[in-house]
Amino acid sequence: MHILIVHDGIIPVSRYGGTERVIWYLGKELARRGHRVSYLVRKGSACDFGTVTFINPARPLSMQLPAGADVVHFQNVPPETPIRSPYIITMHGNANSETVFDPNTVFVSRNHAARHGSRSYVYNGLDWDDYGSPDLNAPRRYAHFLGDAAWQVKNLRGAIHVVASVPDEHLFVLGGYRVNFRMGFRVTLHPRIRFCGMVGGEQKAALLRYSKALLFPVRWHEPFGLALTESLYFGCPVLGTPYGSLPEIVLPEVGYLSAKSSELAQALKDVRQYSSRRCHEYARDCFNARIMATAYLEKYHTAMDGQPLNETPPKLLEQPAEKFLNWE
């Protein structure tokens, strides 16, 4: 099968980049299975297991699709005009209540789909071989925050408050800087908070190996959250809020969920109750690229058979009343 993956981004990704990381591992796994993989992506991309064509931003995407693909896999953005090839669209983020999605839309968690009146979803998976083998017996010295720290829905302030309320605890912030200009001038001076910047690759892996837990007190409905599975793979339980995908991904044996800072602080104090090995094995076995590719191949075949992935076009069923979900 010839699969064309379309995304307005650059591959491969070296640091931050959730969608780019997912489609790279998806294509890599499909190629391993003998499928022909092509990408239509931004200039600057390269790939050693598939063909790369660069997007021309001056032309509609639907007019740039290379000929010969059996199925086209769009990311986030549907084609502007109908195309002749079978296709699916993965929606990686949240949308507002005015968005009506294409019937061939795939979401990235059960909750993500259900909030849009859909049952069509595929969990994101990663190629754990690229992450190396974590040292599950390594000393755990600090908690960590992983995500775009300038994005207020990620609630770095909440994570800092949790750590600040636990004596002698430290927080490493992966994905942010002590001085932030993106959301207005903001500086964090707390002595037990260390900012590591936008890290990736071995630098990120080295930091996760010595973390005792991921603090993830998001204040929105997280669609999936690669930070969850990456942290779990390195043996870190997840302490977060019960929103979006978290209740279905963060099982009780690998983490704790609450919208109360005091309860997450207590969970951090009791974090030794979680098994690093159980966290690692759970992420390794349930959120890998092999499972993801198998699920997408089923979606591809459905589209190639001329069947929609959703009986009716998905649409957000209920807009949250507040911009930020509850956090105490």
Image (tube, rainbow, N blue to C red):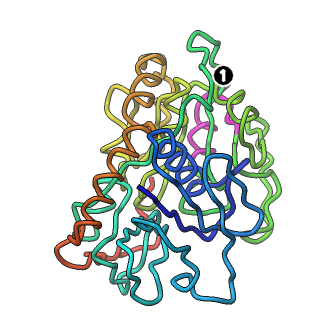
Q: Secondary structure at mark 1?
A: loop
Q: Residues within 10 Å of mark 1 (few under 14, many from 20)?
A: many
Given residues 95 and 212, the one toward you in this image is: 95
The quadrant where residue 6 appears: bottom right
Residue under the point 63% across and 24% down: 132
Kindly identify which residue carries mark 1: 210
In the image, which residues are magenta?
A: 159-172
Q: Position of residue 290 (x, y in %)?
A: 41, 37
Q: Residue furthest top?
A: 137
Residue under the point 60% across and 56% down: 20
The quadrant where residue 304 appears: bottom left
Given residues 157 and 249, the one toward you in this image is: 249
Q: Position of residue 137 (x, y in %)?
A: 58, 9
Q: Looking at the figure, which quarter contains the N terminus?
A: bottom left
Relative to residue 76, is residue 55 drawn left or right?
right
The quadrant where residue 292 appears: top left
Q: Position of residue 122 (x, y in %)?
A: 34, 52
Residue under the point 62% across and 50% down: 147
Residue under the point 48% across and 18% down: 276
Relative to residue 127, is residue 320 drawn left or right?
left
Q: Position of residue 80 (x, y in %)?
A: 47, 88
> Given the image, on which type of amino acid does mark 1 rest?
Tyr
